Image: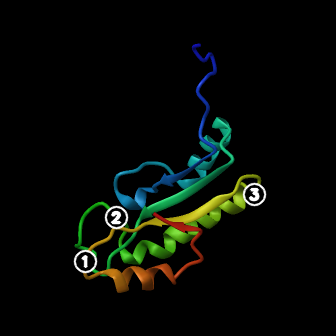
Amino acid sequence: MVSRMSPRLPVADYHTHTPLCRHAEGEPTAYVERALALGLREIGFSDHSPMPDDDFDDWRMKIEEFPRYLEMVDEARLRYPRIPVKLGLEVDFIEGYQDWCAELADRAPFDYLI
């Protein structure tokens, strides 16, 4: 028997980035508006974590931008209280940087780390 059910949207999207990652466009508020339009129940932001050396690569936020990232997610939470907006980071495992990642994880009340 062939199913005639239409594909369902995911309940949440936890893998979104802000322009601070240098490969995404749009403010978090725009992502939340789109999530609401799609009927998502939650959305989470997970920019690539900064590294202690800003020249580490060119696709993650710089360490001095980290406070702005937190502000951007908080702004989206305040503006759209009817949908949970989660704070996360995409943290790469790079040998020798485990202590840095642990320190960074303690700098904010993250909901999740990818």
Report x, y in % for residue 34.
60, 41
Per the image, label 3 sits on a secondary structure element best described as loop
Q: Earlier in the sequence, mark 3 or mark 1?
A: 3
**Type of amino acid under label 1:** Glu
- Give me the residue at 34% from left, 81% from top: 98
Q: Residues within 10 Å of mark 3 (few under 14, many from 20)?
A: few
Image disc number at residue 60: 2
Q: Nearer the viewer, residue 6 or 104?
A: 6
- Give me the residue at 57% from left, 69% from top: 71
Quadrant of the image occupied by residue 14: bottom right
Cα separation, mark 1 vs mark 2, equals 18 Å
Q: Earlier in the sequence, mark 1 or mark 2?
A: 2
Position of residue 34 in the picture relative to residue 96 (left or right)? right
Compared to 113, does 33 lie above or below?
above
The residue most toward the top is 1
Cα separation, mark 3 vs mark 1, equals 39 Å
> Which residue is disc 1 drawn over?
95
Compared to 103, does 63 lie above or below?
above
Quadrant of the image occupied by residue 17: bottom left
Q: Residues within 10 Å of mark 2 (few under 14, many from 20)?
A: many
Per the image, label 2 sits on a secondary structure element best described as loop
- Give me the residue at 44% from left, 81% from top: 104
> Which residue is disc 3 drawn over?
81
Report x, y in % for residue 112.
54, 67
